[in-house]
Image (cartoon, helix red, strand yellow):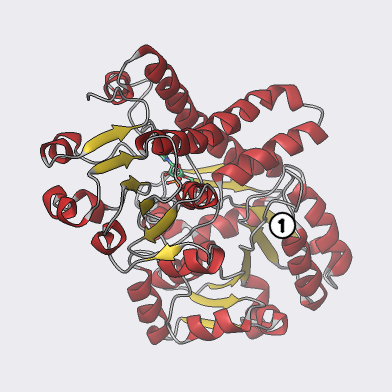
């Protein structure tokens, strides 16, 4: 029976720990946040993720998944067999304050806290998204601080999970990537992931730097794809064309494909925006800044979508937000999560509030997290409540619930029948049939 510890039980770590326990491993989750650990140990998820509630409580009840906030417990996990325990590090690497570069302080502190306690040769595996070169730097630090010295091993195993699909992406990923420095680490990781590779999931073995870069490159590509179609939306608006039809027509070409080609308010969240910025910063340090200069444009196109949404909303409010009531549907950065980090929806809501509107937000899951970050906005308990008396509805996060609303029922409660679809996700015909003025980014007003 393999024993595994997972250090850092935020979004990534908690899902990773519970998923590995579900494969039959004995897993110890560790975090310095005592409140988070207490909640997880009681089977209560500290965040919303579809299916995680059930997975966590099942695995805690099985006894395979336990939690601690002590590095000593992590180092001792496995007792006499502790040399065979593998330690995954899943702490976050946020954007540094006032800079583009990633802050690796948390990951450094894990090595500093754990390494001195590891008295037998052990494998540590980083999963966090880090600047290229971090794993090599951490290997030296680990070996210098651990009593096992140069026998300590470090590998990298980037994570590609999407919020809202975290469990599926962990247990049925498109691919596994492991960056290793020795055969023993490769064998240990192949062993951990055997239940997945046995089902046909490909596992790629690389050096450390390549594994770090795969993650950065994947997020850079995805961001570029979204900004590409949003740039086309800008051109479509200028040319009087319809970006939704354009996107559909492009998607039939298998070389392009339709996924991540949905135009709208653009990308947000805790990963894509910070990761492309950290990638640019690291490339600059490596002397390769020209290679990633285009990502600055990708970022700029993305931020322009937010400004354009505010402008279009103002236009729909006859040129001024003063005295207007605006309903904002959606606060999370995307549906099926309560995560509001760098949420385009809240960014737009806050900007409209500052321009004199009364703004009422409703999100099916993220009202609480939004209220903590943006206490000056009003929050309603339902989409209809938010829409009551509104001069304009802004649809900014495409939850299924909003698509399933009856526009006629919404029409009964609003002051003026106007909707701006920031995600190109509502059925424009239905809304128009209910007497709404429907506008969307990148589409002519008559469509
Ligand atoms: C992303 C990556 O997909 C994942 O592989 C990585 O591990 C972490 O970052 P996530 O942040 O959960 O995952 O969200 P994702 O589903 O990728 O969406 C990112 C943003 O792009 C959202 O704000 C979404 O609304 C937006 N988006 C996505 C679009 O605007 N258009 C699209 O066509 C697709």
- Ligand 1 neighbours mark 1 (CB distance < 8 Å): no
Measuring 30% from the left and 33% from the top, which residue is drawn there?
A: 439
User: In the image, is 337 to the left or to the right of 306?
Assistant: left
Measuring 58% from the left and 55% from the top, which residue is drawn there?
A: 187
Res 332 visible: no
* Residue at which label 1 appears: 154
User: In the image, is 341 to the left or to the right of 432?
Assistant: right
User: Horizontal and vertical percent for residue 277?
Assistant: 67, 39
Measuring 67% from the left and 84% from the top, which residue is drawn there?
A: 73
Question: Is 76 situated above or below 114?
Answer: below
Ligand 1 lies in which image quarter? top left
Tell me if mark 1 has few (under 14), some (14-19) or many (20+) residues whose alpha carbon lies within 10 angstroms of its own.
many
Res 27 visible: yes
User: In the image, is 132 to the left or to the right of 88?
Assistant: right
User: Horizontal and vertical percent for residue 194?
Assistant: 45, 57
Task: Decide which of 364, 59 is in the foreground and name it.
Answer: 364
Task: Decide which of 222, 334 is in the foreground and name it.
Answer: 334
Question: Is 148 situated above or below 302?
Answer: below
Query: Residue most toward the front?
Result: 323
User: In the image, is 76 to the left or to the right of 237?
Assistant: right
User: Horizontal and vertical percent for residue 265?
Assistant: 43, 38
Q: Quadrant of residue 152?
A: bottom right
User: Horizontal and vertical percent for residue 432?
Assistant: 16, 36
Task: Decide which of 126, 263 is in the foreground and name it.
Answer: 263
Q: Locate the C terminus by quadrant.
A: top left
Task: Decide which of 190, 394 is in the foreground and name it.
Answer: 394
């Amino acid at each position: 029976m393999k024993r595994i510890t997972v250090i850092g039980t935020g979004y990534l770590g908690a899902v990773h720990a519970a998923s590995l326990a579900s494969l039959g491993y004995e897993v110890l989750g560790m975090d310095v946040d005592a409140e988070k650990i207490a909640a997880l140990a009681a089977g209560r998820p500290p965040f919303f993720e579809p299916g995680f509630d059930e997975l966590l409580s099942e695995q805690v009840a099985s006894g395979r998944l336990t939690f601690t906030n002590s590095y000593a417990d992590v180092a001792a996990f496995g007792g006499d067999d502790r040399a065979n325990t593998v330690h995954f590090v899943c702490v976050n690497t946020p954007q540094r304050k006032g800079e583009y570069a990633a802050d690796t302080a948390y990951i450094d502190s894990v090595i500093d806290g754990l390494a001195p306690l590891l008295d037998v040769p052990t494998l540590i595996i980083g999963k966090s998204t880090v600047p290229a070169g971090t794993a090599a730097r951490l290997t030296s630090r680990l070996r210098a601080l651990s009593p096992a010295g140069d026998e300590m091993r470090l590998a990298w195993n980037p994570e590609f999970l999407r919020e809202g699909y975290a469990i599926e992406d962990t247990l049925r990923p498109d691919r596994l990537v492991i960056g290793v420095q020795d055969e023993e680490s490769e064998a240990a990781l192949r062993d951990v992931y055997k239940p997945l590779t046995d089902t046909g999931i490909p596992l790629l073995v690389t050096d450390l730097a390549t594994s770090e870069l795969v993650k950065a490159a994947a997020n850079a590509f995805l961001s570029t794809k979204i900004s590409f179609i949003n740039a086309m939306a800008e051109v479509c608006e200028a040319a009087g064309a319809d970006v939704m039809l354009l996107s559909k027509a492009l998607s039939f070409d298998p070389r392009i494909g339709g996924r991540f080609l949905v135009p709208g308010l653009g990308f947000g969240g805790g990963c894509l925006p910070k990761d492309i910025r950290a990638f640019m910063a690291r490339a600059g340090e490596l002397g390769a800044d020209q290679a990633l200069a285009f990502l600055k444009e990708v970022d700029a196109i993305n931020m322009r979508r937010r400004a354009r949404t505010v402008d279009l909303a103002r236009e729909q409010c006859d040129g001024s937000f003063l005295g207007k009531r605006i309903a904002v549907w959606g606060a999370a950065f995307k549906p099926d999560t309560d995560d509001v980090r760098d949420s385009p929806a809240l960014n737009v809501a806050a900007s409209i509030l500052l321009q004199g509107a009364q703004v009422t937000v409703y999100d099916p899951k993220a009202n609480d997290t939004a209220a903590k970050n943006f206490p000056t906005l009003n929050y309603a308990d339902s989409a209809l409540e938010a829409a009551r008396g509104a001069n304009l509805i802004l649809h900014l996060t495409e939850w299924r619930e909003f698509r399933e609303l009856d526009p006629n029922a919404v029409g009964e409660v609003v002051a003026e029948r106007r909707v701006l679809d920031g995600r190109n996700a509502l059925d424009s015909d239905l809304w128009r049939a209910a007497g709404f003025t429907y506008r969307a980014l990148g589409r002519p007003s008559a469509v």
